[in-house]
Amino acid sequence: MTASEEPPDDACPPAIIIDEVQLILAEKRTSLSSLRTGIAVFAIPLSVMGMLVATSRYYEIADVIPLFIAVMVINVLLLTLGAFLVARAIIKLRNEDRMIRDLKRKHSVIAEFID
């Protein structure tokens, strides 16, 4: 099929367009779940640090330095993982919003159903 024989965008059945939008929305839900997970992972080190500060009168940092360093390394890794998940989810959400906006612009049939 050559470029001159391709059907126009509006010739696509509305059911297929709606299926495309549903697929994009399913991906968007997955991205939102990833965002929620990233925020939760990001909050774990903050909770651990709060607990360490609250119990700091029961130990001397010099006595538990190897354990303290291990906890800090794990905290940094969790913060990095959380930041990565949040950033990736935000990028994917913006991309999915752009795809839905492009579909709405191409196919006026579904524009009234999606805001």
Image (cartoon, rainbow, N blue to C red):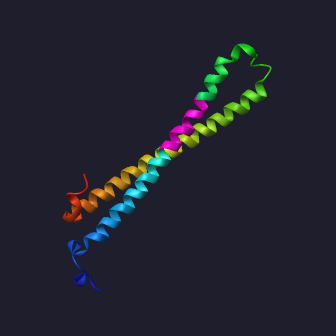
Examine the structure image and report whether residue 40 is included in the region drawn in magenta: yes
Position of residue 112 in the picture relative to residue 21 (left or right)? left
* Vertical placement of residue 103 versus 85, above or below: below
Question: Going by the picture, which residue comes out furthest to the bottom?
Answer: 1
The answer to whether 35 appears left or right of 99 in the picture is: right
Q: How far across and how far down the image is residue 14, in percent?
A: 25, 70
Residue 8 on the magenta span: no
Residue at figure coordinates x 27%, y 85% from the top left: 2
- Considering every residue shown, the one lying at the far top of the view is 57
Residue 71 percent across, percent down from the top left: 70, 31
Q: Residue at x 69, y 18 (%)?
A: 55
Quarter of the image where one finds residue 107: bottom left
Give the total of numbered labels: 0
In the orientation shown, which residue stands out farthest toward the right? 63
Q: Is residue 18 left or right of residue 107?
A: right
Image: 33 above or below 1: above
Q: Position of residue 12 (x, y in %)?
A: 25, 74
Q: Could you say where residue 36 lies in the image, as x and y percent from the top left? A: 49, 42
Seen in the picture, residue 6 relative to 114 is either above or below; the reply is below
Q: Quadrant of residue 27?
A: bottom left
Q: Quadrant of residue 64?
A: top right
Q: Residue at x 24, y 60 (%)?
A: 104
Q: Which residues are magenta?
A: 36-46
The quadrant of the image that shows the N terminus is: bottom left
Q: Main secondary structure of the magenta part?
A: helix
